[in-house]
Image: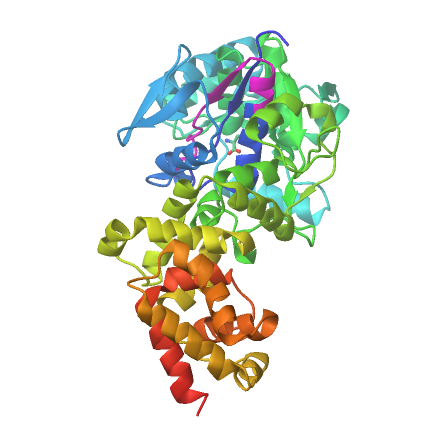
Amino acid sequence: MEGVRVRFAPSPTGYLHIGGLRTALYNYLFAKHNNGKFILRIEDTDRTRYVEGAIENLINSLNWAGIKYDEGVFVEEGKIVQRGEYGPYIQSERLDIYKKYVDELIEKGYAYYCFCTKERLDKVREEQKIKGLIPRYDGLCRSLSLEEAREKIANGEEYVVRLKLPPNRDIKFKDLVRGDIIINTEDLDDQVLLKSDGFPTYHLAVVVDDHLMGITHIVRGEEWLPSTPKHVYLYEAFGWEKPTYVHLPTVLNKERKKLSKRHGDVSVEDFRKKGYLPEGLVNYLALVGWTPEDNREILSMEELIEEFSFERVSKTGGIFDIDKLNWVNGHYIRGYDLDKLTDIAIPFLKEAGFIDDEFINERYEWLKILVATVREGLSNVSEIVDKVDIFFNDKVEVEDEEALEVLKWEETPTVLNALKEEVENAQEITEELSKTIMKKIQKSTGVKGKKLFMPVRVALSGKIHGPELVSIIYLLGKQNVLKRIKYIENNHLK
Ligand code: GLU
């Protein structure tokens, strides 16, 4: 497709919602698939919802997820900068532009000044509700002449500017997911375009900016679908060519409700903090509301770009299934670059009090082996804490019934004694020794198989399941292995 330009246009209200990340992702995939451009615009015209630091937060989340854009707002060396030929890309810096277009609409009769007070609007709304009508502006100020209105403004009266919708007209547009949509203006409100504080509303700003920034496809959540007819009418009023619309199904939880903060994690940051990998989260999110032609479930960013199209976006809500996310993420954890995975795991181990900076400096290689040993069973990196405690605790309590049973076996004292001797005789437990030590004690004791491995496993880890025995022995090292055997001998074998 020629000349595709799409944008992600979040409002900086705090954090990036997982549904917002999916919107950004679909925009990105579509742009890259078509060799187009992807723009990040910040929609901050609702000053009451503005949150300090939210822009940086949003951008960090996009960067973390690996979603790159070509134009718009960036953070460089901790500072917000803007790049591109269509700036500014922050709406609060474009107020004079909106003012100019509002004036044009008023001149042409597509918009009007409205002086109704909040009290009056509340009253109208109340009366409509009582009559069972859908609350909307009753149009009182539509009939004011421009001269009358200007006089009121000169007298210092507060005003807003509203869109003047024509009565009983069908507004039509096509949505690539939803198909043809027709809405009659009788079902629409005379939308406020310019607020009394001089800021435009979203509805005006979005149309003006999408047009001026040359946006070809508007890809956004379906919660904006009811607003689209007003936007379409504005394009007509300005005499501009309409973009193509694509409304994405809402991301829902398993109960088919909107994902909300009250029901758990919803921000990209929450998932990052739990130790989800960007590749895992992005791969999974792509599948929430879209499927590739061959129904594959593991796709890299390059493959997603290759496969993505709006034809395969579903009309109904995409279900966010945490078990599926865990499965996809586990896949990426198992195949991840070990250095990178170790660096992601380190903060969790620090937080748990297992390691400090000195430890990291001195024993980074050991940490890598630790991570390699336990990564198999992880669905997110934070789970590593529960898997590695056996390597950081001085002694290990045996609580499990089956494990206690193993310690009662006839062969157990012999096996542990042989292990102790081998370890005592060694300078240290090298990787090589950890690989051969079990063979050695098999030879010296004549005990084989389960009867050989289980006592060692239980003595060293307290459990009958867990990481490879070779890794346990190596990671514990000489002193810890001896300490644990001693503990078991003193507390269980006497
Ligand atoms: N600022 C809107 C939001 O916060 C953008 C909607 C759109 O993409 O048009 O979601």
Q: Is residue 275 left or right of residue 289?
A: left
Q: Quadrant of residue 421?
A: bottom left
The answer to whether one can see residue 184 in this image is no
Quarter holding the N terminus? top right
Check the picture and name the quadrant holding the C terminus. Answer: bottom left
**How many discs appear?**
0
- In the displayed structure, does residue 164 sit left or right of residue 397? right
Q: Residue at x 74, y 38 (%)?
A: 316
Answer whether residue 32 is magenta in the image.
yes
Task: Report the residue at 35% width, 74% height from top.
Answer: 482
Foreground: 2 or 126?
2
Question: In the current view of this chain or complex, which residue is farthest to the left?
Answer: 358
Q: Position of residue 5 (x, y in %)?
A: 54, 14
Could you say where residue 215 lies in the image, as x and y percent from the top left? Answer: 55, 15
* Residue 187 within the magenta-colored segment of the rendering: no
Residue at 32% x, 57% y is 350
Question: In the image shown, does 171 or 31 lie closer to the viewer?
Answer: 31
Residue 8 coordinates in the image, percent (x, y): 51, 26
Residue drawn at x 44%, y 64% is 437
| For residue 427, above or below residue 221 | below
- Give the x, y percent position of residue 16: 47, 40
Q: How is the image coloured?
A: rainbow
Q: Is 156 placed above or below 269 here?
A: above
Magenta-highlighted residues: 29-47
Of all residues shown, which one is farthest toward the bottom? Answer: 494
Residue closest to the eye, 446 or 477: 446
Rendered image quadrant of residue 221: top right
**Is residue 432 at all visible to an observer of this figure?**
yes
